[in-house]
Amino acid sequence: MSGTHSVVLVHPRTVTGWQAQPWCDMPLELLCVGTPLIRAGYRVRVVDQRVMPDWREALLAELSAGPICVGITSTTGPQLKHALDISRLVKKHSDAPVVWGGIHASLLPEQTLQEPDIDIVVDGEGEETFLELVQALEARRDITGIRGLWHKRRGHATFTGKRDFIDLNKQPSLAYDLVDVGKYTREVFGVKRLSFSTSRGCTHPCAYCYNTVFHRRRWRALRADVAVSQIKEFVRAHGVHGLFPTDANFFLDMDRARGILEGVVRENLNLVFTRLHTRFDTLSKMSDEDLTLIERAGCKCLAVGVESGSERIRHLLRKQIEVDRLLDVNRRLRRFSITPLYFFMIGLPTETEEDLRDTISLFTRLLKENPKAMKSVNIYTPFPGTELFDVAVAHGLKPPERLLDWSSFSYRNLAQRGPWLSKRMRRNIETLDFCSFFVGEKNYLKPIKKTNRLIVFLSNIYAPVARKRVEKFFFRFPLEVKLVKSLGLFGKRN
């Protein structure tokens, strides 16, 4: 039994290179598993590599005290490299079991456990599973009866069985004092904001989304009264007026969403919701009364996944959006103070130059017809287990055979250089990914977020070139993109 009665939770870095907008959201996933431990009497230390320059010293100090185990979160992409490095560091200086959780480890637990420095994987939600695991490890009990675990047995990964989802409404408010909350504030729309969560998962079948696998197309949410109570407690405890709900689909239940927004207004919380996520089919059905309520509650931005200007590609993604209706709703939103933010993906399997031109045409028109509108263009990242991942494999993607190789999968880089695309299309995708930052009234030059001043100055000089590239669909000789990437300022080439 550990003398310290302690557990260490680690959040690895999620990016490589330098950031023009240095920030990160609170490690909610670690707070979710840390809170039950605190309530059970354990000492929990969160080590966040993203915000702690002395993270190594802090981790080594905790290891020297002999923790029960070390938990590490994982997401497909660059974070995996950092997570592996941390796991090796733990094993070098401690006998504590290394437990991985999070999206990637849950999607590929068997491959994850092939790494000698990883002992156990928590599958899916960890609140109950991890608490039971810690209790068993401390008492040196057998863990095979704990549902939701993958562990090594005679050199092979063994699963203890799926665990039911937890009831969010029965969970206590998160123990935010596990971290220095001030390190996670971010200025958006002129206010300092923090991330928060009121629901998990989504019921929709989007072919590219890990939610279909990780949350099994299940959506669970706090009741409106519970959400309002927790929001009220949160903002008053931490003195912030900005809130970013990380919910994948805040408006999936419109009655619940209305209840939360009405409660925020009724409690006079004087909040700014810097962004709320919705689907277009929901947005298109919102009445003027709904949009007025969203305004009154302080929502500055509604984020919508459009994904592509090509009807064929949208069908492939299982995104049924009629462009005429989208354009009508976009124009309608001009009457409100709400900023619509449209998400697009490029570099998709089977995508052609014509599809890419359709995407440029659509987001350009949306921005032109609503000067308040914004867009975000990102490179497609294949998540294992999703429907579109299988399409990518059928068109040439070779799934990595080692955990480390997944670290090159990023929304800033084509996964394994996008084998489903021609060389010319890969060049077009990577150049558009960079140049799109400079298109539109609200772009990198007029940021709603604090951005490094030198970057803004240089961007103003380069912007006309980027806009002309996009307008003319001229993506040849992208020397500036290669230079910026080589310096680690905008992702890195695979």
Image: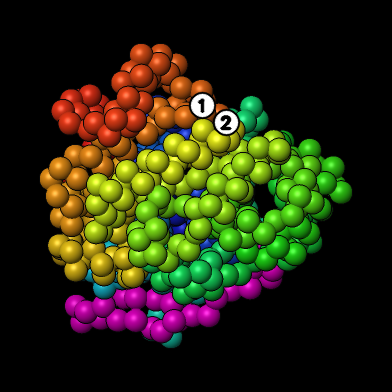
| Magenta span contains residue 153 | yes
Q: Which residues are magenta?
A: 147-172
Decide if residue 229 is on the left or right side of residue 221: right
Q: Where the N terminus falls, by quadrant? A: bottom left
Circle 1 — which element? loop
Residue ID for mark 1? 441
Residue neighbourhood size for the residue with mark 2, other residues' Cα within 10 Å, grouped as few (<14), some (14–19), many (≥20): some
Q: Relative to residue 46, is residue 318 depicted above or below?
A: below
Decide if residue 180 is on the left or right side of residue 81: right
Separation of residues labelled 2 and 1 (CA atoms): 6 Å
Q: How is the image coloured?
A: rainbow
Q: Please identify the residue farthest to the left as the structure is shown.
A: 423
Decide if residue 256 is on the left or right side of residue 386: right
Q: Position of residue 78 (x, y in %)?
A: 29, 47
- Front residue of 141 and 348: 348
Q: Position of residue 86 (x, y in %)?
A: 30, 49
Q: Residue at x 52, y 62 (%)?
A: 33
Mark before the other along the chain sequence, 2 or 1? 2
- Tag of residue 177: none
Decide if residue 370 is on the left or right side of residue 406: right
Q: Are marks 2 and 1 in contact (CB under 8 Å)?
A: yes
Q: Amino acid at mark 1?
A: Glu
- Front residue of 323 and 255: 323
Confirm whether residue 49 shows in the render. Answer: no
Say which quarter of the image contains residue 432: top left
Residue ID for mark 2? 371
Q: Position of residue 125 (x, y in %)?
A: 49, 68
Residue neighbourhood size for the residue with mark 1, other residues' Cα within 10 Å, grouped as few (<14), some (14–19), many (≥20): some
Q: Amino acid at mark 2?
A: Pro
Q: Residue at x 14, y 50 (%)?
A: 422
- Front residue of 235 and 476: 476
Q: Residue at x 58, y 35 (%)?
A: 370
